[in-house]
Image (tube, grey):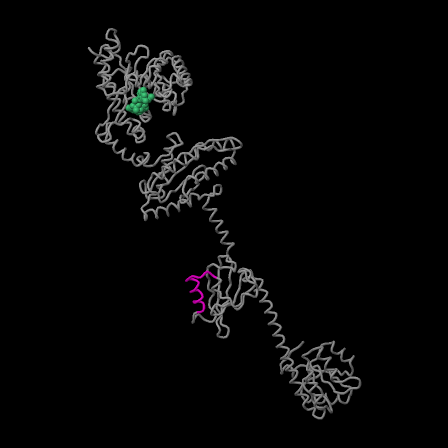
Amino acid sequence: MRSMDLPQIMRSVTRLLLVEDSEDDEALVLAALRRSELSIEHRRVWNRAMLAAALEEKCWDVVISDHNMPQFDSMEALKMVKASDPDMPFILVSGAIGEETAVAAMRSGAQDFVMKHSLGRLGPVLVREIGEAGIRRSAQLATQHLRVNEALLNSIVNTAADGIAVINASGSIEFANDALARMLGYGSQEMAGVDISQLLHQNAATASFWQDLFSAGSGSTGKPADLQTHARSRDGNVMPVEIRASRMDARGNPKATVVVRDVSERAHSEERMWRLAHFDELSGLPNRLLFRQLLEQALRDASRSNKPVAVLFIDLDRFKRINDTLGHDAGDDVLREVTARLRSCLRDSDIISRFGGDEFVALMRDIDDADAARSAAKRVLAEVAEPYSLQGEDYHLSASIGISTFPGDSIDADALLRNAELALYRAKDQGKNNFQFHSPQMNARSFEHVVLERLLRRAVELDEFLIHYQPQVDVTTGRVVGAEALLRWNHPGMGMMQPGKFIPLAEETGLIVPIGRIVLMRACAQAKAWQDAGAKGLRISVNLSPRQFALTELVADIRNILEDTGLAPDSLELEITESMVMENPEHAASILQELRDLGLMLAIDDFGTGYSSLGYLKRFPVNTLKVDRSFIKDLPEDPDDAAITHAVIAMGHSLRLIVVAEGVETIEQVEFLRLHGCDLMQGYLISKPMPAADMTRYLELRDMLTSRSRAGVTGDLLR
Ligand code: C2E
Ligand code: MG
Ligand code: MG
């Protein structure tokens, strides 16, 4: 199809299809057109078949048709032409045409009619009609283009993954694509008229976003503006969205195109990344990185609220063994189980983190005092110690815990972690399965112990300690062979305190070292005094604490004390416990040997309550075995205790040890011990522990009653 403007028509050839049966009329028409300066190429047809064939060629610019032809007429020709090309100019030429016919022809699509007697009009009519047909065709083409563009645009808009809307200045949606409708749960036709602000999270930022977009002076097509917000779908689902809107002015009518992108997926993957970076995969607990941030936050809160914070560094003891023997899957199961148990021991507001391996760290916020951490640590130790069922068998684990507190130990997150870890190492050193505070005074069992510790320190300065003595006698002869020195604290307000009340604390704080030295000094001096008063060979037994035993200067200290007091080494017996030597048997053996080399006597105290292996006694150079009171207590009735005591006495003797029974309270017990050959005994039946002055009188009295005539150990006392 061709379209032309007027000068083009003048210049180029106009192809005319003439429907005319008369050659004369053909000549007349051509003559008339020749005058119009149109350059014409034409073909004449005069029946239906010819016209149809010509129209097939689709090369005509205009059709001029006679009205009356034999077997054919202009109305039929018009119908055929318009059917072939509705825009083809059709001009009727007739000698005598009625007005009605002309109107009917025009109605059916003819462009004009020209009477044969005024053919002079034909040229200008042709020019006009060809021109208008061109314009009609251009317009049609433009519309077609527009339609194509619109279809293209529609397909772009509707296949876009992002939601697209056009809104007016009042925020009402005028158009929304399918994606937006789908995203927000609307039908594709339901969005028109909806207010966009109802679909989005409403806050100050969103409100000013739309306001800025439409505010006067922002130009007809503003720069696109972006907004991160949340959209709410019809069913209440909230999703993070990114919005890009640009304003356009449609004939002074401001509108905006809004592109809405659902970024949930991205938000999810960002969250996944964040989780990977901040959580431990195995346990699901926060990792070190996140814990550190949470700790800092907690410290900031705590410095405002003035509440203490505790950090518990928890490490499983010998966890590696499980991994090595049962494999990593079993190890992982245990770690997950431990995670659950830790959760059960702590409050929901506490944070538990896994630092890796078998290291867990707990953060306790908003606690009243260190006692909360202490109780939590106890719960953790107890829970972790419960058996783990692995591959059908029960396994046991323990944990060691180091605790630091804010603000006592530090106000700095890193320092708190470091302090807790240092305390953990101490807990491991103390034989594992225990907890230690970083601050020594916190290791005491409660606040009262903090007070008690202060008092105890003062007691050392003010020398409020006394020693009571309990005699040890020969089971068969009743002869006094020695005495055990037992510590007492005579506090001015609290009265006489038994060692059970304060020795553990003295032990924990290390105060037992100076206190123990006082006991040794005083007991040795006292023994020497008794010996000098006649109790020749009287032996003094002094209890040694694990702390003292661990002192490198122990042997030198004792040598000095013996020198200072003048007591013979074999008159001093040190009482140690099984656990003290079993902690590090090699080291213990060498220390014990050094003490033996000094000439001292060594006794194993409370025998039967610890490892109770007579086998190991062979390896240690000890002289005496003290059978714990718990075995003596129910003698002779309890057959188990009877059997054990009997066996211990017999085996002690086979190792050439002196066997001492502790806590003898009845004659029946003495009978049993005598029957089974026990060497020595001590207990309330003979005497309760007593002050030195009473002991002196006791020794005098015993001497009078039992050995005044015989030369006994205490025979010289009265002299
Ligand atoms: P231990 O060395 O086994 O001392 C024996 C304990 O049994 C003493 O308790 C004594 O009073 C008590 N006892 C003796 N005979 C009987 C009896 O017939 N019946 C009953 N029920 N008890 C009896 P004590 O004096 O309270 O001392 C307790 C523990 O404190 C001692 O046990 C010892 O382990 C420790 N201890 C005492 N003095 C010292 C000391 O100077 N240094 C150290 N490191 N520990 C000490
Ligand atoms: Mg003892
Ligand atoms: Mg004992």
Taken as a whole, is the magenta stretch helix, strand or loop? helix
Q: Quadrant of residue 616?
A: top left
Q: Quadrant of residue 52?
A: bottom right
Magenta span of residues: 200-214
Q: Is residue 680 above or below residue 116?
A: above
Tell me residue 551's x, y (percent). 31, 26
Residue 553: tell me if it is visible.
no
Q: Is residue 374 or residue 433 the one in the foreground?
A: 374
Quarter occupied by the N terminus: bottom right
Q: Is residue 595 or residue 632 the one in the foreground?
A: 632
Instruction: Give the left or right position of residue 581, taking residue 200 as reference.
Output: left
Tell me residue 20's x, y (percent). 76, 86
Query: Residue at point 45% right, 39% down?
Result: 356
Q: Quadrant of residue 536?
A: top left
Tell me residue 109's x, y (percent). 68, 82
Instruction: Give the left or right position of residue 445, taking residue 31 as reference.
Output: left
Q: Is residue 657 above or below residue 126?
A: above
Instruction: Give the left or right position of residue 376, taking residue 195 as reference.
Output: left
Q: Is residue 250 or residue 704 the one in the foreground?
A: 704
Quarter occupied by the C terminus: top left
Residue 506: tell me if it is visible.
yes
